Image: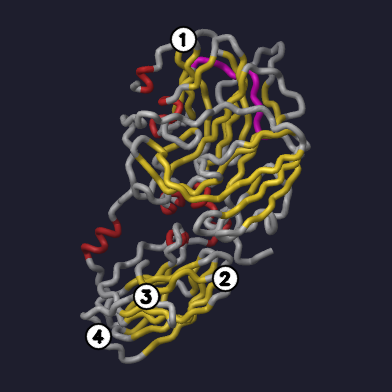
Amino acid sequence: MSEERKGDGWWVVTFVVGVLGLIMGVVGIAMASGRSDGIAASADAPAATGAVDFDVTLADISVTPSSIDVPAGKVVTLHVTNTGTLAHDFKVMGMNGLGAMKTGEKVDLEIGPFTADTEVWCTVAGHKEAGMKMAVHVLGGTGAVDAASAATAAADVSAKIDGTAMPPEGWTGRDPQLGPALPGTMHEIAFDAVETTMEVAPGVTQQMWSFNGQVPGPILHGKVGDTFRITLTNKGSMGHSIDFHASKVAWSDEMRTIQPGESLVYEFQADYAGAFMYHCGTVPALHHIGNGMYGAIIIDPPVLAPVTQEFVVVQSELYLGAQGAPGNLTKMMNEQFDAVVFNGYFAQYKFAPIHVVAGQRYRLWVVDDGPNENSAFHIVGTIFDTVFKEGAYLLQPDASHGGSQVLDLQPAQGGFVEFTFAEDGLYPFVTHKFANPGKGALGFFAVGNVDTSKLTGH
């Protein structure tokens, strides 16, 4: 088992969030031996009078040492080694320095001279926020921060959701219907890890990391005893992986991170019934899940009561970065979500209500893919007479006439509820954690011939 690879967000245990780095007053020369990204010296920097050497180790996800003390006006040589399983770069203020380094690669980087404190960090998305940064303290320097630069760096550039906005003409929501279980017992399925820009709320786009260009990823549906052979191909720009919670396989094998252009085969037999999460586990797993690399696999119990139709809803959160950029890892670490959504889009089934018929019986599967927020799934105007959670029935129709109002789920839990609608009309569904419906965790069942124009605006 690789010591560097950390699975399922374990790096959080040892990670301490650093104070936002000081913005250097002057960026001097920073060049790698034979691998300069093109750095010019500052006209205001004093001439170099010597060099100071440091050994620097890049791992997943850390930099050792986390800080160095250097004399003012001196060129500093960093002997940088990437011991991680992922590619990392290392740049002064995220601009000038080393390009991507492969696992095991060693490169010398010259930086400075400096007259004020600065930072060097990995610019791979989320790595700095996860801890891959090194403070440079300049002894005898000004220690000052450029106020204008600091203000710019601290400014919140996150995209904003307008709760009154409508999707563009021609927009269609994701179909929530769950198709029948796959025929046969062997299912060979191709998964591509891809990074793509998509709309996540009216007028708001993000660069989402995804499986097959979908967020959530494809919903898989099988039976107890089925075998799934998943071929994962990394068509992205960084390392990715996959972890099926419905499987019993070695984390160090099928769940390993693969680099861009690589593939792996993940094969497992689904021996247990349930509504299971799957997700990317590449460090930082929190960022990969929070930025769209999650989905659900439904494994039916051996005996299921007949229903008219089945649906599936995956709850998750959005942690918005800048418009068109990946999600913000710092927000994810602090659980500061901008939205809670069903099937990846803000208030999706308000804009595209789910149409059903009164008196018919329906089954709705719910999986909370988080990565952080719980769910209290509730449909206003009906009662669940069947509840199945985490592989077991909690309630079934019998002479006691028991009813349930909420399916409560923690992140990575799943189950289903069954219900009917007594009459035509609109029936909202929400998470009953009531801070969150206004943040996008809201949809509607449209039962019978009912006017939905006030919901959709069309």
Q: Residues within 10 Å of mark 3 (few under 14, many from 20)?
A: many
Q: Secondary structure at mark 2?
A: loop
The earlier-in-sequence mark between 1 and 4 is 4
Mark number displayed over residue 46: 4
The earlier-in-sequence mark between 2 and 1 is 2
Q: Residues within 10 Å of mark 4 (few under 14, many from 20)?
A: some
What is the spatial separation of the Cα atoms under label 2 and label 4, in whole angstroms?
Answer: 36 Å
Please identify the quarter of the rendering in which residue 264 is found: bottom right
Residue 391 appearing in the image? no
- The answer to whether 376 is drawn above or below residue 84 in the figure is above
Of 344 and 20, the residue lying toward us? 344
Question: Is 63 left or right of 407, judged from the image as shown?
Answer: left
Q: Is most of the magenta stretch helix, strand or loop?
A: loop
The colour scheme of the drawn protein is: secondary structure
**In the image, which is nearer the foreground, mark 3 or mark 4?**
4
Residue 115: in magenta span: no
The earlier-in-sequence mark between 2 and 3 is 2
The residue that mark 1 highlights is 449
Q: Quadrant of the N terminus?
A: bottom right
What is the spatial separation of the Cα atoms under label 2 and label 3, in whole angstroms?
Answer: 24 Å
The earlier-in-sequence mark between 2 and 4 is 4
Mark number displayed over residue 103: 2
Segment colored magenta: 381-390
Q: Amino acid at mark 3?
A: Val
Q: Residues within 10 Å of mark 2 (few under 14, many from 20)?
A: some
Q: Amino acid at mark 2?
A: Thr
What residue is at 70 percent from the left and 34 percent from the top? 222
Mark number displayed over residue 136: 3
Q: Amino acid at mark 4?
A: Pro
Of 20 and 5, the residue lying toward us? 5
